[in-house]
Image (cartoon, helix red, strand yellow):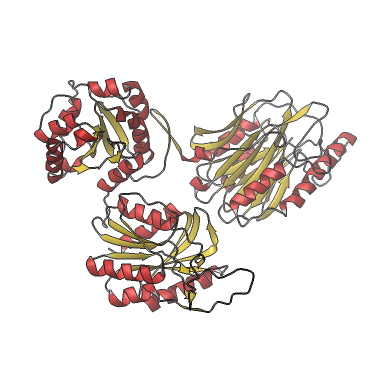
Amino acid sequence: MCTLILFYKLFGDAPIVTLHNRYAKGDAQEYPPRVTRDGYKVYGPLDVTSMGTWVGFNERGLYVAVTDQHSGDVEAVKRSRGKLISYLLGSFSAAEEATAFLKEEIKRGYRKGNFVILDENRGFHLLYDVDVTTRELEGGVHIFTNLTPWPGMEMSLRVKEIFERAETRKNRGLKLAEEIDTKDLDRGLQGLREVAADHGENVGRRSICYHDETGEWRMTSSTIVAVGRNLKDSRILYCRGNPCEGEFLDYSHLLKIEERKGGEILRKSDKLADRKVALCLTGSVAAIEAPKLARELRRHGAQVDCYMTDYAVKYGVSPEVMEWATGNEVVRELTGRVEHLHDYDLVMVYPATLNTIGKIAQGIADNAVTTLCAGTGMDRLIIVPAMNMRLYDSPVLQENLSKLKGLGVTVISPRFSEGIAKIPKVEEVVDHAIRRLSRSRLRDRKVLILTGPTRYDLDPIRFISNKSSGRLGYHLAKEGLHRGCRVKVIYGPGEVQFSEYIPVINVYSPEDMLEESLKELDKDDYDVAIFSAAVLDFKPKERADFKVKSGKEWSLELVPTPKVIEQVIGEHPDLFVVAFKLEYNMPEKELIEGAHERLKELRADLMVANDLTAIRGERHKAYIINKEKEVKVVDGTKAVLAEEIFNAIEKKF
């Protein structure tokens, strides 16, 4: 049977959002959502018997689902609808083409049904009963059950009973759909979870969360799908059995998984795409972190090989683990394949012991690791020391490290804790790898980033501020670092923790931010300044030097604060400036027009316009506008927005 509730073109981030409650015969078994490939990648649950699906979408954004059509006697079935849907998803990218094929194919011995075929532009309902009929779906809420009446249809008493139950579920679904928040995808999906578990007036065969007292049919699962305009923003939620008794699990990670040798990899970015990295392990317990590093490098697109010394195997991890982590055989000794002459974009010694560092500095090549390093250009070598502090303080080691740095080797400083020079965090090492391999035109450009909130004290206890967190500034700093920029951050009193290797100046008030900005710009020749900080527009005219007693009215007079960006541009007119403009609940056209006017007034180079109603946690919709009034719409995470801002900056250099 099944109930399918469709929200078509109602959610801005996801044009296709559906809830599919599947009701099947008592012995039906299924697998939860997975990725299959027969042409296009397909995402959806699978029936154990047919290995086909009843609801799913593909990597091109095509969505297909089916519900039964119980209009009379069960017809003889030769072919599987589930396999047919899987074929459609694997073969077509557009709803119109898929529907045209289905219209002819469905006549070849398939069971009756209601097929829904959608892409972000067009959608169709194909009803297969005594004949095949199709209709195009407009944007809105649509509900499909296990019986769609057609003109002239005659119903037996049994069919009338089926229709009455189906209509009850449909009407209940329409009522509940009115309460779904379509302005926010996360809240909308939470609402659909509740709809999936709904019993209406009574638990039974009339409820969306289906219960059959006869035992003939049962609810096997509930699947919630949101197909995003950007595929990686799509969502898949799945609950086995009845949602009133189980819980939804999030399978959205499937959209970011890549099938590679060595297992599945959740792709995070393409910043190391097709770059070849050699990860060299030496004799330190810190080598236990190497599998994590290898996987993280691969998540950014790198192809990773592993070289190990005998002591790395003895004191660190097994070659089998590193083979799993990299997806490639581990090199432990040199053979006729001349592994030491392989041409890598980056060779990383992680961890690097005192012994190995000394050998590399003196050009000694006596094992697979040191021989590879000897044959690698110094500018492609990264050394990550880890050892006891007594060893790290050795004058000989420090002399060798200084020598290697002078030759162009990147040395990543350890973390000093508990008397040990500990291996840096995996995140830091990956950041340095991305930075080293960056091809950006912004490499070595100096970038100043203002971010976070600002505050003014009302009295020694209380202050006024705003809702800015500084998270976008964090991602801007990371993106600048990745592109090889020399980044410095001026940060208001927020709660974001910047990486230790990103220099940060902490400030409190708008005056502090202005003072530090001018000081930095006067001291250093910066190329770019990004004004993502939420600088207060007003401050109290007077500050109380004592705690104001509660229980009575307190009137405050607010006066304007200095405009940081205006004063900075006035004193540094040649600086490339990225300005920000935040509004609230403003029409898109008006927002863009106002932002462009402000850009011209400031004589800035780029303006990032946002509306607070479109900022939800890590998701951030914004408009990047240049002097020519070219607009780039960004609707993704703050990390994606930061990347697009730097893309726009790079176009101007």
Please say if 499 is above or below 52: below
| Quadrant in which the C terminus appears | bottom left
Residue 248's spot in the image, x, y percent? 63, 38
* Relative side of 292 to 389, left or right: right
Residue 368's spot in the image, x, y percent? 19, 25
Decide which of 238, 288 is in the foreground and name it.
288
Please say if 131 is above or below 454: above
Please say if 186 is above or below 46: below
Decide which of 23, 474 is in the foreground and name it.
474
Residue depicted at x 72% and y 40% = 197
Residue depicted at x 24% and y 70% = 522
The number of discs equals 0
Decide which of 25, 602 is in the foreground and name it.
602
Residue 560's spot in the image, x, y percent? 46, 78
Q: Can residue 244 be seen in this view?
A: yes
* Relative side of 89 to 493, left or right: right
Residue depicted at x 20% and y 34% = 390
In the rendered image, the residue lying farthest to the right is 157
Residue 279's spot in the image, x, y percent? 27, 33
| Quadrant in which the N terminus appears | top right
Decide which of 261, 308 is in the foreground and name it.
308
Quarter of the view holding residue 295 = top left
* Relative side of 58 to 642, left or right: right
Q: Can residue 4 be seen in this view?
A: no
